[in-house]
Image (spheres, grey):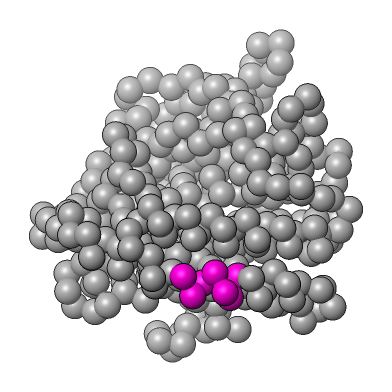
Amino acid sequence: MKKNYYLFNPGRLSRKDNTLKFVPVDEEGQEQKPRFLPVEGVSDLYVFGSLDANSALYNFLGKKQIAVHFFDYYENYTGSFMPRDYLLAGKVQIAQTRAYLRKSRRLGLAQAFIEGASFNMLKNLQYYQSRQKDLSAEIDTIQSLRSQISGAQDVSALMGVEGNIRQVYYQAFDAILKDFSMPGRTKRPPQDEINALISFGNMMCYSGCLRAIHHTQLNPTISFLHEPGYRRYSLALDLAEIFKPILVDRVIFKLINKQMIKEKDFDRQLNRCLLKDSGKKSFIQAYEQRLGETIHHRVLKKKVSYGHLIKLECYKLIKDILGEQPYKPFKIWW
């Protein structure tokens, strides 16, 4: 079974027969013991340090359908190397473009994304409310704000509603989390430990959504909620809205409340707070575990992993775009 690999150290990546050879470099520039990755077992590579690799290596990765996602020192997602779009189909791309260009179609899909995202946020709060956390005020406010989604006249107004919902949602984190507090959402750079975890987790979710899109006939640059931009895979941002509460936030709650990640795992400096490698590794381990967990799908009548749910969401979107079946966002039902 293929899996993701994470490269935290700077180093050199090359091909050695049918394996990938990664030679990490320490802070003094000295090469360390090489690490060998079997190509057939690699799904994606996540690179958090500087990487030395040539075009021949990327040609090889492309042929093997291995994506590479890059992050800078401040944990910001900077881009991806994606294999050739071998699944792109003209019929789907034309329909996807038409759906974006028609204001009512675009708005309807954008509303569906926010409907799903806000519902999953609400379910998170209701879960902790049932465990003796007083979140009734936040729950009531979000329920009231959700009623404004269907009445939004354009995507800009809809984004305003989403922003208000998310602000109230994040205000509830202090009641859910032990030992850490979050005065408010900050990013680029994050100002505290919880914001550092949110930013890091959201980037992981975004890149996972991008990879799922790549395995379908959808074009990742044509989106409905987020405005498409030059060299921007904005459809991944749309899908990530639905899954961030389920994947990212639930992992954060678990890591903090079970003390699986602590203050020593953060690098806190003036006006910024970042995860140390130990913190990144703890998050990634819990996140990968979450992706592998399964639920019994009510429609498919079988068990599917959280990771596979993202790809299923892509297929549902394709059916809507082609006029086969209206898109209904994934919502937690348990």
| Foreground pick, 283 / 235 | 235
Residue 204, horizontal then vertical, whole percent: 54, 48
Q: Quadrant of the C terminus?
A: bottom right
User: Which of 65/199 is in front?
Assistant: 199
Name which residue lies at 14% across and 58% down. 98
User: In the image, what residue occupies the spot 55% across and 77% down?
Assistant: 332
In the visual, does 99 lie left or right of 81?
left
Between 218 and 125, the residue placed more toward the observer is 125
**With respect to residue 74, does 333 lie above or below?**
below
What segment carries the magenta color?
Answer: 142-148
Q: Is residue 281 magenta?
A: no
Q: Could you tell me if residue 216 is visible in this image?
A: no
Q: Is residue 305 above or below residue 159?
A: below
Residue in the image at 38% along x and 65% along y: 152
Instruction: From the top left corner, tell me how far across and down residue 69 is, in percent.
Output: 46, 38
Residue 143 image position (x, y, % from top left): 58, 75
